[in-house]
Image: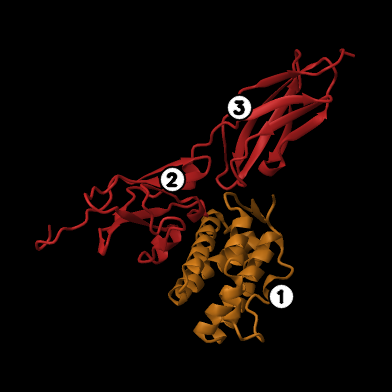
Chain colours: A red, B orange
Amino acid sequence: LTGGVAVLPAPQNLTVLSINMKHLLMWNPVAQPREPVLYSVEYQGEYESLYMSHIWIPSSRCSPTNSLECDVTDDITATVPYNFRVRALLGSQTSAWSTLERPFNRNSTVLMAPRMEVTEHGLHLVVKLEDPGPQFEFLVVYWRREPGATEHVKVVKSRDTPVHIETMEPGAMYCVKAQAWVKAIGRHSTFSQTQCVEMQGEPL
Amino acid sequence: EFRFGPCRVEGVVLSELWEAFWAVKNTLQTQDNITSVQLLKPQVLQDVSDAESCYLVHSLLKFYLNTVFKNYHNKIAKVKILKSFSSLANNFIVIVSKLQPSKEKDMLSISERAHRRFLLFRRTFKQMGTEAALVKAVGEVDILLTWMQKFYQL
């Protein structure tokens, strides 16, 4: 209470969960018995915090929101530290701002090994890769399973899957693995599990 | 990545810059009614050698960060423009932070040539009234990005 007037508490424990360049800001709820509480999210990049720290920009998706999380992926468009703040809204009441403890930089996102499906179609290896977004490219590595095999590498943009890899020899076994690469942050994921497929037909 | 001569810059996706500018291009360029003046005129950006490019882009982007964006900010009414400026400015910060223009003596004549180009740009900017110059400089970000694109490798 302040001067006998109930003060709306600020949201606590702001954190960012970032996987595959999807960034989710989360916070604890503000408990209020009667009415639903709304929340408003704002951000500033390194430029704003360096050159004009009074400038905060309303988040694209959560100004306001009744959720306890906010997808801030579209707000983060540079590989620099971003500050975030959240406040609660209840009727005409607004809480103080609660600010993310440490600025978030998208280069800390967790990059998962890509999900991959390898099939054979008329002596072609067909590699289907999940599409996590336009920022992603894939390194597809494939080889013929035999002693001393040479690895071949193909760089694929996320929109260009499934990938048809050139003609293979009938009856031979081919193996494939892939990793994701994000240019904007200069990082790649671990490799996916290797998958092997036998080509139809009698060996030459 | 960008390759301004010996200077390399990773971690900036040029399409993100274009996206930010296209979102506000019409709003910005309709504010500029002085069509007889161009800040980023051919003498500034034409026939820039690779060696000069690192010096010139460093000077231009720092000017945009320290002068243009900073002073144009209080003219911004719409949130959409605020977001675009934030995207441009924060990516310009990444580029500037990664550029390391050489200070070697044998590069002096090249850096001076680049500096003369920049001075020409800044002199034209100063000759205009501040407000008009800010509006024009912001509206010419597409000229700047088009020139920077020549040094961008996919």
Q: Please name the residue shown 30% across and 44% down the image.
A: A28
Q: Quadrant of residue B47?
A: bottom right
Amino acid carrying label 1: it is: Pro
In the image, taking residue A39 as reference, residue A34 lies left or right, namely left
| Dots 1, 2 in contact, CB < 8 A | no
SS label for mark 2: strand
Q: Give the Cα separation between the discs numbered 1 and 2.
A: 45 Å
In the image, taking residue A136 as reference, residue A163 lies left or right, namely right
Amino acid carrying label 3: it is: Ser
Task: Return the x and y of residue B124 as percentages of the image width and height.
Answer: 60, 82
User: Viewer-nearest of labels 3 and 1?
Assistant: 3
Chain ID at mark 1: B
Which residue, given by chain and number where applicable, does mark 1 sit on?
Answer: B42
User: Viewer-nearest of labels 3 and 2?
Assistant: 2
Is the residue at mark 3 from the same chain as the one at mark 1?
no
Q: Nearer the viewer, residue A63 or B11?
A: A63
